[in-house]
Image (spheres, coloured by chain):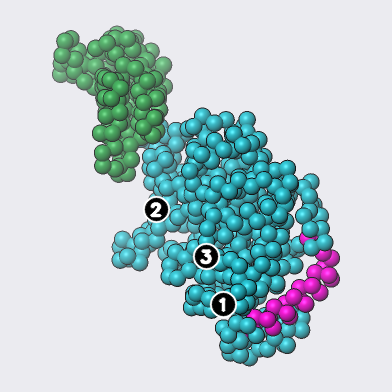
Chain colours: A green, B cyan
Amino acid sequence: MRVKQISIFLENKKGRLLEALKALGREKINIRALSIADTLDFGILRLIVADPDKAKLVLEQSNFTVKENDVIAMAVKDQPGGLADVLSTLSNAGINVEYIYAFADKQENDAVVVLRTENIDEGIKVLKKAGVHMLSAKEIYSL
Amino acid sequence: MSLIWNKKAECLLPIEKDQLQLERLQHIVKYACEKVPYYKKAFDKAGVKPSDIKSLKDIEKLPFTSKAELRDAYPFGMFAAPMEEIVEIHTSSGTTGKPVVMGYTTADIELWSEVMARSLSMAGCTKADIVQNAYGYGLFTGGLGVHYGARKIGANVIPISAGNTKRQLEIMRDFGTTILTCTPSYALFLAESAKDDKIDLKSLKLRSGVFGAEMWTEKMREEIEKRLHISATNIYGLTEIIGPGVAQECEVKNGLHLQEDLFYPEIVSPENLSVLSEGEKGELVLTTLTREGTPMIRFRTKDITSLHRGECKCGRTSIKMDRITGRSDDMLKIRGVIVFPSSIEKALLEIKGLEPHYKIIITRPHQLDEIEVQVEASEILFSDEIRHMEETKKNIENHIEKSVGLKLKVTLVEPKTLPRSEGKAKRVFDQRELK
C-alpha cells in the first residue's frame, strides 16, 4: 500500500547523517526503516517513520531540505527467493523499480520491503493482483 | 513620475553640458597639477600641460590614474586641499595591501549630498519618506553617503547601519520604513530572514529600495522586487570618486543616470586603454570635475560597462551607464576563456527554484583549471531519486555552459550553508595561486 516516506538531502560532509538522526531522536521520533543512497558529492537519506509530518518539520527546523513522498510497502516471506518472486511480478508487467530497501521483522516471519516505482498506483495494482501482502501505513508504523 | 531633484543640472542641453564640462575640466586639471605633486609628475612624464586641454576630447592626452598610484600615495599624498580644509576622510575597502585614502572638503561633502539627493529622488524619495539605511557606516562610504543625501532631501533617516537582521526587520515593521538602502545580497537575506521570523513583508510600508556596492543582475532585481514587494533601483559609486551617487537608476530602470555635470565618464578598452565609443563595452574611467579634497583625473574604475546617450522618459538628459557586468580585475581566465563571475550568476539565476546564493571555486588540480559552482539544494531542486538529482545537476551545468561557454561542475550543498554577506559578498574563490 501507499506509505509516506521522507527523504533528506545530505551534503557529503562529516556528521550530517548523525545530525539528522539526532534531531529525530531528540523529538522521540522512531525510525521504522532507513536507506541511504550516495553519490560522489551528496547523499539521500530515506526514512519510514511513525510520524512523517512531524519528522519533516523537525528536520526542516534543523535546516535540512526534506521531501515527503509516497512509496509502496509490503510484506514478503522471509525465505530464499521471496523478494525475487515479487520483483519478477513487476518485471513481467514492465514496471521499473527506482529504488528498494527492506528489513526483516523479528516477530513475524516476513520481511518488510519498501519500494518506489515510477507510477506508484500501477505498481500497487500489479502487486495486489499477484497476491502480495501489502502493508498499510498503520501496519508499518506500528511494527 | 518621481521628482527631479535638480532640474537645471540633470536636464542640461548637450551644448550646455559640453560647455560646463569643458570649463570644469580645464579648471580641475590645472588645480590637480598645481596642488598634487603626483599629477604634476605624471603630466610632465606624458608631456602634457593643463593648457593643452582645449576641448573635451583633449582629456585623452592625460595619463590614467589607477588604484596602485593611490596606494603609493598612502596616506595623504593625493590630497589637493590643505589638511585644515579637509573635514572628513574615507577609505576604500582594501582587500589587498593598503587602503586608498580620500579626503573631503566641506564643498565635497556638499557635492556628495547633492548627488545622493539626486539619486534618492530618482528612487522616489521625498521629505515624507523614512529611509532605513542598512549600508555600513564608517570609513566605507555607503552609510554616510545615503545619510547625507537623505538629510539633504529632508527625509527621515534611520542610521541603523549593516547587520543585526532581526532588529532591521522589527524596525522596518515598527517604524514604518518606506525606503531601504543596502547591498542587494543583504536585501535578499532580509527577505529570507523575514520568512523565518514570520514577518509579512507584504504588509509593510516599504515601497522602494536603493541597492548597490556590489555587482548584481536583472534577475536579482526581479527576486528582490517580488520578495520584498518594492521597486528596486541600482546605485553606483566608488570612494575614489566620491562614494555612492555617481550614477543611479530612475524609475525607467534601463541604465543608471551618471551625474556628468560633476563626473566625466569615458569607456576604455581594458586591454590597450584606447577610448571606445558610445555603446561599446569596456572599463569605465571617471574624472571628478569639481572635487577639491582629492581630485581624480582619469581614474580607472576597473568596472565593466557601456554608456548610452539619448532621451530618457524621466526627462533627465544625463548619459546612462549599463549596470556593471564585471570588473576588469575580477575577470577570470579559465582554460584560456575570459569569464566574469557575474555572467555565471546571471545564468544561475535563470534556473527556476535556484536560490540566489552561490560560491565559485577555481582550482588547478592537474595543470588544468577546474571550476566548481556550489548552489543550494532547495526543496524545489531536491528529489528522493538520485536519477532526478543528477539530472538537475546536469541541467544546471548545461545551462551555464550554454550561456557562458565554459564547462564546469555543479555541486549541490545544503540550504543556508553558503555564506550570506552583510557587506560585499565574496563568492569567488580562486585557489589556483595556492599551488
Residue B78 disc label: 1
Position of residue A5 relative to residue B390, above or below, is above
* Marks 3,2: beta carbons within 8 A: no
Residue B92 disc label: 3
Marks 3 and 1, Cα distance to the nearest angstrom?
14 Å
Residue at image coords 76%, 73%: B21
Going by the image, does B308 lie left or right of A74?
Answer: right
Q: Quadrant of residue B280?
A: bottom right
Question: Which chain letter goes with mark 1?
Answer: B
Residue at image coords 54%, 49%: B161
Tell which of B159 and B27 is nearer to you. B159
Tell which of A16 and B293 is nearer to you. B293
Span shown in magenta:
B10-33
Position of residue B276 relative to residue A135, above or below, is below
Marks 1 and 2, Cα distance to the nearest angstrom?
41 Å
Judge if badges 3 and 1 mark residues of a common chain: yes
Marks 3 and 2, Cα distance to the nearest angstrom?
30 Å
Read off the residue under disc 2.
B372
Callout 2 crowding tier (Cα within 10 Å): few <14, some 14–19, many ≥20: some
Mark 3 element type: loop
- Hey, what amino acid is under mark 3? Ser
Report if residue B398 is visible in the image: no
Tell which of A110 and B17 is nearer to you. B17
Residue at image coords 44%, 64%: B95
Question: Which chain letter goes with mark 2?
Answer: B
